[in-house]
Each structure stands twice: as C-alpha cells, then as structure tokens.
Amino acid sequence: MHGRATPYLFLLPYLAIFGVFGLLPIVLGLWLSLHQWDFQLPDKPFVGLDNYRELFSADSLVFGDWWESVRATAIFTVASVPLLVVLPLGMALLLNRSFPGRTFFRALYFAPYVLGVAVVGLLWRFLLDANLGLVNHLLGAVGLPSDTPWVTATPWAWVSLVGVTVWWTCGFNAVIYLAGLQDIPAELYEAATVDGASTWDKFRHVTLPGLRPVLLFVVTTTILASANMFGQSYLITQGAPGNETRTVVSYIVERGLAQNDAGRAAAMSITLTLMLVLVSVANFRIFRYQED
Amino acid sequence: MTIQRTELSRRRLLGLGLGAGAAATLGIAGCGGDDSEGGAASGDGGKTYTGPKVSLNLWNGFTGGDGDIFKKLVDTFNAEHANIAITVATYRWEDYYAKLPGAVSSGNGPDVAVMHMDQLATFAARKVIQPVDDVASALGLSEADFAPTVWQGGLYQDKRYGIPLDMHPVGFYYNKTLLERAGLDPDKPPTNRAELEEALAALKGKGIQGFWMSPFQFTGGMTGYSLVYQFGGSLYNADATKAAFNSPEAVEAVTWCAKLVADGHSPANVGQDADYLALKSGKNAFNVNGIWQVNDLKKSPQVRWGVAAMPQVGSRRSVWANSHNFTIVQQPRGADSNKVAGAKVFINWLSQHSLDWAAGGQVPARRSVLDDPKFKALTEVNTLAGELPDAAFPPAAPGIGDVTLLFYTAFNEAVLGKKSPKQALDDGVAKADKLLEDNRKKYGS
C-alpha cells in the first residue's frame, strides 16, 4: 500500500500552497529589490544592490526615514515585548485557579483581541485625544494633569501605543499560557507541596520549567508581532510627531504601495527580515542555553 | 470627518458598490429616456451616442454624503440614456489610488475614473489614464467654460488628462455663539489679519482659545499651505523642480500658525479632527476646513455656525484647493470606441448637471453652472466659490503628491514644537528636493 512516494504525496498539497503563497513571493521580493520597480512603468531598470546600499549611505533619499522607522520599531518592540510576555503570564496564573466566574473573566480578558485594528485604532485615537479625549477628562476629574499629549508627543505616544497594544493583544498570549499551564501535570505540584515548597518555589521550579516551550513560542511570536507593528501607529498617532512613531512596516507600505516604489520597499522588507532572523536566532540560543 | 478620510467598513463599501451596481442594472432593465437630452447645450458630434448598448464602469472615492448624490446623478443619467449604463464602484480615496493601477494593467479597471487634480500627472505618467483632448474638443469645452486655474491643472506635457467636475477649496468656519460671547458680531467674521488677531484677543479675554491649530494635514496643514501662498511664498518653484517651502515667506506663514499655540489661541497637541469637533461643540471659534464640511454642519442644527472666505492674513489672498476630474482609463486590451463615445456623453452630461453636485458641497467647475441663479441660492458653497480666483491648486508633476506630504510633515513638527518652523521646513525641503530628483529619474520628465 505504502509506496515511497506516499509521505511526499501527503506533503504535496501544503507544499503547493507554501510554494505559491510563501516561497514565490519571497523570491519575487528578492528580484524586485534589485530593481527600480514601478509595475506600471515600462522601464524597470536593474539597479543591483543600490536599494540596499541606500539604506546605509547617509546622503540617500531614504536613509533618514529608514533609520528613524527602525528606531521607532525598536523602541516599540523593546517596550512592548516584556509587558506582553509577563502580564499575560500573570493573567494566566490567576485565570488558571478555580474561582466563581472564571470562564467569564477568561472571556473578558480575551475579548479585545477579537476587535480589528481599525476599531481599536479609531476608538483609542478619540479616547486619547489630548484636548477632547475621555482619558484626559477622567485624569482631570481625579486631580491629575489633564493635558497629557497622549498621541502627539513622545514619550507619551509610545506609552499610548504600547498600552493599547497590551490591552488589545495580551488576552491572546494569556490563552496560550493557559493551555501550557494545563499541560503541567498536577502530580508535580503535589510532590512539591509534600516536599514543603512555597508558592514561589513551585512557580520557579515547576511552573516556569514546565512552560519553557510555551514561553519560547510566546516570546518569539510576540517579538515578531511587535516588530511588524503597523496599524496602531498608522491610525492612532499617524506617525506623529513628525515621523517619530512611523514604524518600519508603515514606512515600507508608504514607499511600496503609496509611492509605487516596490524596489526600495522590497529591499527594506528583506533587510527587516534579516534583522528579525538575527533576533530570533539569538532568542532560540538563549532558551536552549537555559535548557543545558 | 472629511470626505477624504471618512472611515467606512469594507462591508459598507462593498454594499455601496453593489447597491450602485444593482441600481445601474435596474437602469439597463428599465426603459430609457431620450438620448438627445444628454447634449442640450450646443450640437456637436461627441455629445450624443447612438451606437449599440454599452455598459461602463466608473470608479470614485466619494465615500461621504457626496457619494449618495453622485449615485443619484448616475441613476438619473442611466434612466435618460437607454443605450448607456453606468455602474459605479466607490472606494476610500487612499485605497482607490492604490488599487486603480493594478486593476487597469490586469484589464479589470473601470472605463471612467474620478481623480484629484494633483494625481492626474502621476497617473498620466504611469499610463493609467489616457489623454482626453479629443473629448474636450468633441464636447467643445475650452478654458472659457471653466475657471482657468482648474482647466490648466488638467494638463500634463501639453496633453489634457482630466475634465474638471468641481473645485473644493478650504473655507473659514466660525462658531457664532462663541463670537457673541466675546462681544463680536456673529455675522461679521474677520476678513484680514488685524480683524482676526483682534477677534482672537477678544475671545482670549473670555477664556476661549479661538483658533485651534491642528498639526495634521487635515486640516491644519491645509491652513499652513494656504498661508504660505498668502504670505507670497509657494510650495515649489515655477516648474515644480525644486521645493520652496523654506522661503522666508513660508517660514513666516508656518510660524504664524505655530504661534497660535504659544499665544494661547490654540491648545497644544490638537488631535486629528479635534479642531473641527471643538468648533462644533462650542470650544473653538475658528476652523479652516474643507468646503465638504458644509453638509456635515447642516446635520447639526443646534450648532450656530457660518462660513466665510479665508481671511487674508498675508500680503495677498489665497486658499488651498483641489479639484475632482473625470478621466478615461487606458484599456490594455484595446479601447472600445463605443465605450469611449458613451463615456464622453456621460462626462458632458454630468458636467452640465453639476448644479446638483454642488448640493454635495462642491463648487462646480463649469462657468455656466457657476453663473446659474440656482447655484447662487446655495449660500455657503457659493460664498466659498468666491475664493477660487485666488486658489492655490497643487502643481501638475508626477509624484508631486508624495512630495507635498513632506511639507505636511514639516508643518506637523513645527506646530507640535518638535522643531522650530525654520528648522522643520529646511529639513523638509532637503528631503523634498531629493524626492523630486528621484521622481524626475523615475518618470523621466
């Protein structure tokens, strides 16, 4: 029954999909990045590595904007990832205990995640408006400063973007953690209790090691998601002040789709990908090192 | 919300498109009226279409209240023309401009597309739209039929790419309740710098921040744009090869805007649309905003508001303005001459019926309609029509829209106090010149 081709035949459908929607766009992206490419213009000259070189030469058109956007993405990632890794873990630990209304709270904390970025963005843009927004109004009502420029000046814009993103997506990470927590055998906790371990000991020596694969997954996907942030800054701060909160993906979209400069945009995408590959490799190394 | 920025869900957009499609289909099914009604003005070859039945697709970005008026006009046209059926699809402008080139090159584009004046050169250079000189000549249209600035704006490399439908300047909106509270005449808004500054001082005396300055393109940036021209500056040199928005005049204009915050006439950190919302809610006395807000304000009868021509703050009169144009889209599979003929009839018909379009909050481009007493009856829109002889339309050069965005970024930095106006504008111009150079290489002009 089972010929040698059987496993490959089973893999074929996915391979076809991956090839068309994964591999081919990547190869095309590489090809685009070596050209000055506007698909509408008849002339698409080959420019070699110029699009990449420009990203690193200070007098080029894109240099300043590119590095400003890299900086924005880096700030956002560094500020949001720790929160998005730690807070959901705390939430998951709480929601994993048995108490009345547990299901309700699980649903409640997950709820924002089902909203689209357009809803989240518009909602918070109005709530955070410095002069007319509800947030400053409430702060004023309890005697706190009521003129914080939440979306038009840094560092407040970063606080807003990170805060909104945490509010929006931490439910997702919490659900992943929750699944991980439920996979840790109850006997381990019982054994630890018998050995006289405190709650902290149990967390440190049973829960965390048990969650390691889940933690690696959460850290990796959260870093990638944060590094690809686009909608929040596009809608809430519109990159302001100036272009300080315009992220890499936002800038790529602007160049590639609005200004029809697919060549440069592709070069930027590939450079961003390489940066993220480096970060992910480092991330895997750190977790493996801990395992040894 | 401005028309350009109106947020609509995809579903609603699809709904609009499908609804329009269904309406147009009904138009085909229903019995048609008399063709000759289409060309009532003066007898000419291109004005009527007697060939076999054609169906035309038209794309636009009228997602606001203007979209409904446009659809109604199209329905009327379809009912009057048995052998032409127009189907309308509406997208948000940003999506629309991104989508159009791809659709056209794959042969799924529309036949007729509505486009802003400052986009014409870009889309002409990118071969998305085709010259319409023959349409203009067949319809006997010439500069005399339109406001000259608008007619000139449709030209790129000596060929005509757009037939103007309307013009939309910004105007000076004011809150009458606040003016009264400050002891000012609510029916006499300021018309020049001295009156404006006097009014602002009076408002400030009552604790009112009178002129909220938004740091964003809509519509603080457009205020700044208008003032650059008012102070005698310009965004670009004459042939749009160099950016000029760091000239002393431009710096003076942007400084005037930024200083409103320092002088306490505007709060700092005004958010997107907050300036306009504050005008409506009685917190802000003055707001420079698009003519398209007239209809939005009419929906709020409790707000006592008025609109006037923008005060002359600088040494001459000027306002930001743009214009919607009809374009005929290139067909990679070869043009169908019947469709082009049908499109001509439609463009001419709608241009003549643009009085109804004016009710959507736009100034008709056609002189004959401008002089129509019925247009004079549209008080607010008619008031702003008076600004148009001095309007500063964006120049026609491919890719210029992207360069102008750099002015708006510099304006943002200046008003938010991130940089001094001079510094922000200098930085913006340095970048703009590089982008202009890059555009020249790309488009070979």
Image: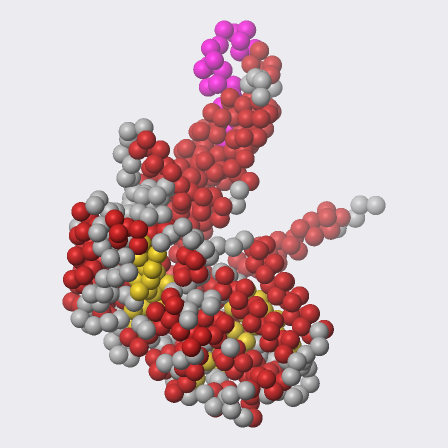
What span is colored magenta in the figure?
A: A191-217
Scheme of image coloration: secondary structure
Query: Does the magenta segment cover residue A215?
Result: yes
Q: Main secondary structure of the magenta part?
A: helix
Q: Which of B118 and B3 is in front in this view?
A: B3
Q: Residue furthest right?
A: A1
Residue A168 in view here? yes
Residue A289 shown left or right of residue A172 in the figure: left
Residue ID at (54%, 64%): B68
Locate residue B398, reporting x and y percent.
38, 75
Residue ID at (30%, 57%): B174
Quadrant housing residue B31: bottom right
Q: Is residue B429 above or below residue A66?
A: below
Q: In this view, does A35 lie above or below A156?
A: below
Q: In this view, does B149 lie above or below B435?
A: below
Residue ID at (47%, 10%): A198
Locate residue B79, reporting x and y percent.
64, 75
Q: Nearer the viewer, residue B306 or B319?
A: B306
Residue B96 in view here? no
Locate residue A84, reporting x and y percent.
44, 34
Residue ID at (73%, 48%): A10
Viewport quadrant of the N terminus of chain A:
top right
Query: Does the magenta segment cover residue B361?
Result: no
Locate residue B143, reporting x and y percent.
39, 86
Q: In this view, does A146 lie above or below B303?
A: above
